[in-house]
Amino acid sequence: MRAILFDFDGTIMDTEPAIIASYFHVFEVYRKREDFTPERQVEVLGPSLETEMLKFFPEMDPQVCIQEYRNYQNEYIQNLVKPMAHAMELLEWIKDQGYPAGVISTRLSDSLKHILGFTHMDQYVEITVGHDDVVNDKPDPEGINLAMKELGCTSSIYVGDSTTDILAGKNAGSYTVAAMTKPEKEAALKASNPDVCIYDLLELKQILKKLEGE
């Protein structure tokens, strides 16, 4: 059985308001709010917190900035996130078809499980792999490979909304699906050469049917 694996932020969960608000908070504490430009607001949607904090606050201990970010987000998270359009419907269908589903993210595993829990998405996800479950974050394939091993699968589809996701999927030998959730990221995503691009998560149904027929 093929594993159906997803990135989390921006792919199946709309966490962008939480991410942006949390970064604004860190910039207000350690720099200036206006330094978090619109360009940077797009840039942070995908890479790990450590990568971005090192870039934006080179004079700081990145872990201090990350903790400030997480403290703020943990306080307000339930009011700032919701499932992406059709995510619940797709995951329910995947479960009904008997596919194992998982999430691989640079978010901490406790945070993943917390959000999946209060949005009731946890009933459809068999495994989560977070930042603290691996040595190497995406684009390293470690997280995807770990999920496949735990699920007992030898092949997978990986769905993500960033070039980091597509590279991770390719490095793991997965069939890669680029979720086009933001127009600003489309050119870069297409340039990363995913196997297919989708503009609605429900398109994955037909992709799976086609792959199973090959």
Image (cartoon, helix red, strand yellow):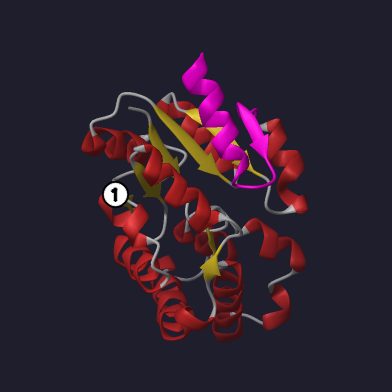
Q: Is residue 193 above or below residue 138?
A: above
Q: Is residue 16 above or below residue 77?
A: above
Residue located 51% across and 69% down the image = 59
Q: Secondary structure at mark 1?
A: strand
Q: Residue 111 versus residue 31: which sits nearer the camera? A: 111
Can residue 208 be found in the magenta stretch? yes
Name the image quarter holding residue 106.
bottom left
Q: Is residue 26 left or right of residue 36?
A: left
Q: Residue 11 versus residue 33: which sits nearer the camera? A: 11
Q: Position of residue 25 (x, y in %)?
A: 56, 82
Q: Is residue 70 left or right of residue 182?
A: left
Q: Is residue 31 above or below residue 158?
A: below
Q: Which residue is mark 1?
A: 127
Q: Position of residue 132 (x, y in %)?
A: 29, 56
Identity, as a three-letter code, of the amino acid under mark 1:
Ile
Q: Residue furthest front?
A: 96
- In the image, the segment drawn in magenta is 193-214
Name the image quarter holding residue 191.
top right
- Mark 1 neighbour class, 10 Å CA radius: few under 14, some 14 to 19, many 20 or more: some
Can residue 2 be found in the magenta stretch? no
Residue located 47% across and 71% down the image = 60
Q: Residue 112 versus residue 19: which sits nearer the camera? A: 112
Residue located 67% across and 82% down the image = 32
Q: Position of residue 163 (x, y in %)?
A: 60, 41
